[in-house]
Image (cartoon, coloured by chain):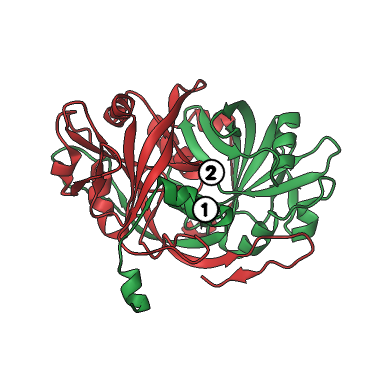
Chain colours: A red, B green
């Protein structure tokens, strides 16, 4: 069978196919299946005032009022310092990864010692947030200051869900449309797939509020 | 000030700026700040065997072993039927929204009566999953069968976090690379920003596992 015939084949993976994958293969596979992920740098400061920066692809929307974001953190992994700092200080920043900093952003996932700042090692630039005791990333076009509201254990796999409230939003330019929509594509924010793939985006369409019996209607972006 | 001068201005929003936004404006604003979101159709079946389909932008990765995905659901909103069906049957499907079905996919967010199927109203096509009692979407290139593992209350805003385990993966073609990575861009999966904006993607790069003291290294996609 030729390569092009192979790729035309439907593929089905059942639970035991997944269970039997080598660990790294399964990690690549499962991490891509949720769809595209947000691409953020989480900035924290430890009790000795050392700044920490970590690429996080698990930030998600929890609610708009109050304005809440969640993120899943694995203890004992490379984000252990980030999680500890968040528990110690109760605050953190979320900074969109933009197209021109994907390389240094991914490099923050290297396992640097706790007392060395990823900012120093990657060339990304910290600037103090005036809202919280944590660093923003200057190179990011959209940065958020976050205050922890709750940390819930996800019992089934011993991960931790950090829920924070947005207390400040800083944008390098005005990316906000009249209706409140933030044009994150214009801000050059990127998306992640799997563990390590970065994508820029191209708008397809934006739709008006859908109603039964009415045809879907485009909103000009 | 001209428009181009306006958009060159940095913008800062503090907590009370956000609190004082009109509700719909704040919803648009906050929903875009987490970054790009996954774009999925969640398929369920009610106790009377009526199929339900709902666009969901809150699906996120929880863990690879066991393979777990989470999603945030608001009770009393348009996803109330989806949530009830999941509680009644313990299963659901997750189907990637692909570039050619963004319109009908968004239309599933219209508030149809519980006893009418969104499949009928949108023209999307159900097909029975053999793994779970819920419909897949034929037009989707990547579909997952899910078994509920846990439903946790997010106390702070009374939303519910549904955690499910992937028990089957169906792909229309073979999108899996040798290392397990699923090339969801090649599958035409899309990303969502805000409440209603759909984006296709363009790969920037994929990076090897990052290590201290080693330059970031590209993996050819």
Give the x, y percent position of residue A11.
Answer: 58, 46
Whether residue A161 is visible, yes or no, is: no
Q: Quadrant of residue A201?
A: bottom left
Asked whether B210 or B157 is in front, the reply is: B157
Asked whether A167 or A214 is in front, the reply is: A167
SS state under label 2: loop
From the viewer's perspective, tell me whether residue B26 is left or right of residue A194. right
Q: Which mark is residue B26?
A: 1
Q: Is residue B103 above or below residue A62?
A: below
Q: Chain of mark 2?
A: A
Whether residue A25 is visible, yes or no, is: yes
Give the x, y percent position of residue A134.
Answer: 26, 38
SS state under label 1: helix
Q: Quadrant of residue B77?
A: top right
From the viewer's perspective, tell me whether residue A49 is left or right of residue A28. left
Asked whether A217 or B42 is in front, the reply is: A217
Q: Are marks 1 and 2 in contact (CB under 8 Å)?
A: yes
Q: Which residue is mark 2?
A: A65
Label 1 crowd bin: few (<14), some (14–19), many (20+), radius 10 Å = many
């Amino acid at each position: 069978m030729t390569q092009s015939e192979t790729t035309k084949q439907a593929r089905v993976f059942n639970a035991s196919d997944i269970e039997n994958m080598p660990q790294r293969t399964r990690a690549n596979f499962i991490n891509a299946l949720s769809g595209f992920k947000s691409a953020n740098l989480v900035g924290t400061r430890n009790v000795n005032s050392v700044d920490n920066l970590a690429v996080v692809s698990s930030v998600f929307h929890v609610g708009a009022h109050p304005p809440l974001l969640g993120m899943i953190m694995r203890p004992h992994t490379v984000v252990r310092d980030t999680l500890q700092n968040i528990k110690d200080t109760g605050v953190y920043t979320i900074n969109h990864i933009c197209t021109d900093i994907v390389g240094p952003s991914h490099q923050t996932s290297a396992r640097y010692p706790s007392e060395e700042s990823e900012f120093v090692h990657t060339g990304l630039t910290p600037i103090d947030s005036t809202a919280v005791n944590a660093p923003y990333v200057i190179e990011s076009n959209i940065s958020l200051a976050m205050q922890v509201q709750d940390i819930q254990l996800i019992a089934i796999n011993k991960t931790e869900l950090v829920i924070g409230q947005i207390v400040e939003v800083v944008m390098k330019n005005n990316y906000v449309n009249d209706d409140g929509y933030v044009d994150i594509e214009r801000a050059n924010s990127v998306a992640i797939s799997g563990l390590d793939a970065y994508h820029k985006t191209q708008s397809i369409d934006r739709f008006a509020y859908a109603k039964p019996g009415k045809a879907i209607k485009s909103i000009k972006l």
